[in-house]
């Protein structure tokens, strides 16, 4: 039997490949500092875990509604609307088993053969993978270091065509930590109205902003009905393994998103949703404390990397990644990342894992302790100098 072409077009996520290799080295007795995986090193807050455990003990372990528990959807609509200055209701919210399904649901619902989908490069690898799987044509939009990893407006306009069906944005951004400024969001909104396309706004890192305030493109005039917001609980509440995300969608997309949930997963895990409800309804001090700690780590990591010969690193405005420029080393990003893992015991990702425009960079996650970052930087310095 031959595997269908669309299945062969799927790509993996490099972070998990590097993690697996690093763990293999650890089993061989090597000590590895993990800066490759985008996962907060904080435990899930106790009140969230307690709520899910309580739900299990109360027998709330069966199937739930395909679109998510009504109480959770109401809480999401309320919190998300307040955060973004928009009014949402329960009929705009679909809860999913993780955030990645939302990328799949959106592309499959809106784009296909003959259509074009614009996505950030460098960017989360699943964007290009799932665009290609749909039969649509992936159109990469370069993000420039000179623009603090936003995009050139004229370059964006040149990529929009009559076949553009969807534009994917991610702010704060993985892998660079960049943020799309409000005036750049306005350019996307103008073109969306002019060319009648939709926007998938990946806002999973919305809480990880260090200097400015978060702005969603959905809050711009008449963009609520053109925007699918991807969000979830993995990053903000250290719930990566809980696999719980959600979409806030225009009302006409509710039915296809519910049907995708029914056909693929039936529903998101029921008792996990009670944990998510506790996350939204209680104090956000746990989130604020984590973000404060990440700011300290970011500042240390950027300052220290910029002291190493062959590296210069912008200070990212959001997320929990740095994207240092390593072009002076004269090595490819994948080769340097491999050398650093094998010879220095530090797991990082080559920028080319995130697209053509990522070549010449590395991605380092600072979702690990300050002590680990200090050891990692010392090893990087010794290896490179």
Image (spheres, grey):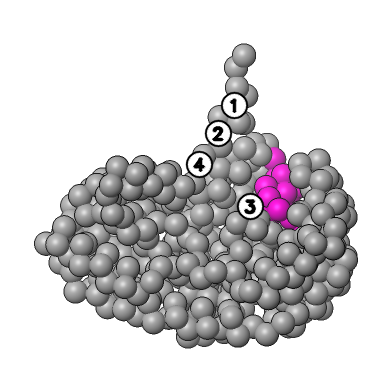
Q: Secondary structure at mark 4?
A: loop
Q: Position of residue 44 (x, y in %)?
A: 59, 69
Which numbered disc flags the more N-terminal residue, 3 or 1?
1
Q: Position of residue 349 (x, y in %)?
A: 36, 53
Mark 3 and mark 4 in contact? Answer it, CB < 8 Å: no
User: Label 1 vs label 2: CA separation?
Assistant: 6 Å
Q: Residue furthest front?
A: 57
Callout 1: few (<14), some (14-19), or many (20+) C-alpha neighbours within 10 Å? few
**Label 3 to label 1: alpha-carbon separation:** 21 Å
Q: Give the mark toward the camera: 2 or 3.
A: 3
Q: Which residue is mark 1?
A: 5
Instruction: Identify the mark nearer the N-term, 2 or 3.
Output: 2
Label whose residue precedes the other's in the sequence (3 or 4):
4
Is-magenta flag for residue 111? yes
In the rendered structure, the answer to whether residue 43 lies left or right of residue 309 reads: right
Q: CA distance from mark 1 to mark 4?
A: 16 Å
Q: Quadrant of residue 301?
A: bottom left
Q: In the rendered image, which residue does mark 4 sit on?
A: 12
Tell me if residue 200 comes above or below residue 181 in the rendering.
above
In the picture, measured across the screen, residue 104 lies left or right of residue 125, that is right
Q: Secondary structure at mark 3?
A: helix
Marks 3 and 4, how far apart at CA = 13 Å
- The residue range painted magenta reads 95-112
């Amino acid at each position: 039997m031959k595997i269908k072409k669309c299945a062969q077009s799927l790509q993996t996520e490099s972070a998990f490949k590097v993690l697996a290799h690093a763990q293999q080295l650890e089993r061989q007795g090597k000590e590895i500092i993990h800066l490759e995986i985008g996962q907060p090193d904080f435990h899930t807050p106790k009140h969230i875990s307690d709520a899910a455990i309580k739900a299990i003990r109360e027998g709330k372990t069966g199937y739930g509604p395909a679109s998510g528990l009504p109480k959770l959807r109401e809480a999401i609509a309320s919190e998300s609307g307040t955060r973004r200055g928009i009014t949402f209701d329960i009929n705009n919210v679909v809860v999913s088993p993780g955030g990645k399904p939302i990328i799949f649901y959106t592309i499959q619902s809106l784009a296909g053969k003959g259509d074009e989908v614009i996505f950030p490069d460098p960017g989360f690898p699943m964007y290009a993978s799932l665009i290609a799987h749909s039969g649509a044509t992936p159109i990469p939009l370069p993000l420039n270091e000179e623009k603090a990893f936003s995009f050139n407006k004229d370059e964006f306009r040149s990529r929009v065509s009559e076949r553009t069906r969807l534009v994917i944005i991610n702010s704060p951004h993985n892998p660079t930590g960049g943020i799309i400024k409000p005036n750049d969001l306005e350019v996307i909104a103008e073109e969306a109205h002019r060319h009648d396309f939709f926007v998938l706004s990946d806002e999973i890192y919305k809480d990880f902003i260090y200097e400015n305030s978060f702005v969603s493109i959905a809050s711009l005039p008449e963009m609520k009905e053109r925007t699918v917001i991807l969000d979830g609980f993995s990053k903000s509440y250290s719930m990566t393994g809980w696999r719980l995300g959600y979409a806030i969608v225009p009302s006409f997309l509710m039915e296809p998103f519910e049907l995708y949930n029914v056909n693929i997963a039936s529903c998101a895990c029921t008792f996990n949703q009670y944990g998510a409800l506790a996350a939204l309804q209680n104090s956000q001090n746990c989130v604020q404390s984590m973000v404060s700690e990440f700011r300290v780590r970011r500042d240390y990591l950027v300052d220290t990397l910029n002291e190493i010969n062959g590296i210069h690193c912008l200070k990212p405005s959001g997320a929990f990644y740095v994207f240092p420029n390593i072009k002076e080393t004269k090595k490819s990003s994948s080769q340097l990342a491999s050398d650093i893992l094998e010879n220095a015991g530090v797991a990082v990702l080559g920028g080319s894992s995130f697209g053509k425009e990522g070549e010449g960079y590395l991605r380092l996650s600072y979702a690990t302790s300050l002590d680990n970052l200090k050891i990692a930087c010392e090893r990087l310095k010794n290896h490179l100098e």
